Amino acid sequence: MGQGFKQSILSKSNITEIISILVVILFLYTGLSKLIDISIFRKQIGESPILEPIAPLIAWGLPLLEFIISLLLITPRYRLKGLYASLFLMIIFTLYVAVLMIFETNLPCSCGGIIELLSWKDHLIFNISYIILIIIGIILYRKNIVVYQTD
């Protein structure tokens, strides 16, 4: 029972599923938080000199994108695409936070929910942590595919 049991719990596919679930929880939580307070979210986006011209599009489009990526992540057939899409979105979020840290530190956070209580530095660390998790998920998912294809 020792080694076989340990491998089944910590298999590549289980770790990938856990990472996917963590990303889904994050995206559903932030997406819902944004939609619940859509007027505040839109106002906060409008205060950003980078996003002001496209604030209405982002206010509705970003939560929708987070929901779509969540659907990809919970569908095994599309999980890898969901991991890549979430990686792309998290990299964009992280670059945005880094730019704000450099140029506009007094802007309000438009993340939604309790995540908006984080400092900009904490946001950066949080986002980088998720990027690392997603990269691990992609690597393990791809290795799991190779293992099944060679068996």
Image: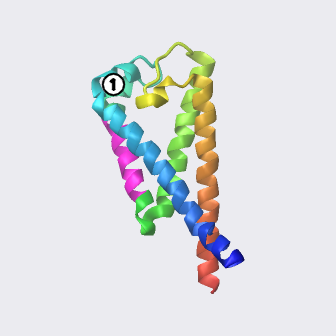
**Above or below: residue 151 compared with residue 143:** below
Residue 53 locus on image (x, y percent) = 38, 23
Q: Nearer the viewer, residue 138 or 17?
A: 17
Q: Quadrant of residue 61?
A: top left
Name the magenta segment's main secondary structure. helix
In the rendered image, the quadrant that contains the N terminus is bottom right
In the rendered image, the quadrant that contains the C terminus is bottom right
Q: Which of 118 and 47 is in front in this view?
A: 118
Q: Does residue 127 appear left or right of residue 67 in this picture? A: right
Q: Check residue 19 for magenta coloring.
A: no
Q: State the residue at coordinates (62%, 69%).
A: 11
* The furthest residue to the top: 106
Q: Quadrant of residue 141?
A: bottom right
Residue type highlighted by circle 1: Arg
**Above or below: residue 46 compared with residue 68:** above
Q: Mark 1 points at which residue?
A: 42
Residue range highlighted in magenta: 60-72
Q: Would you say residue 68 is visible in this rendering?
A: yes
* The furthest residue to the bottom: 151
Residue 71 locus on image (x, y percent) = 37, 56
Q: Does residue 94 appear left or right of residue 57 in this picture? A: right
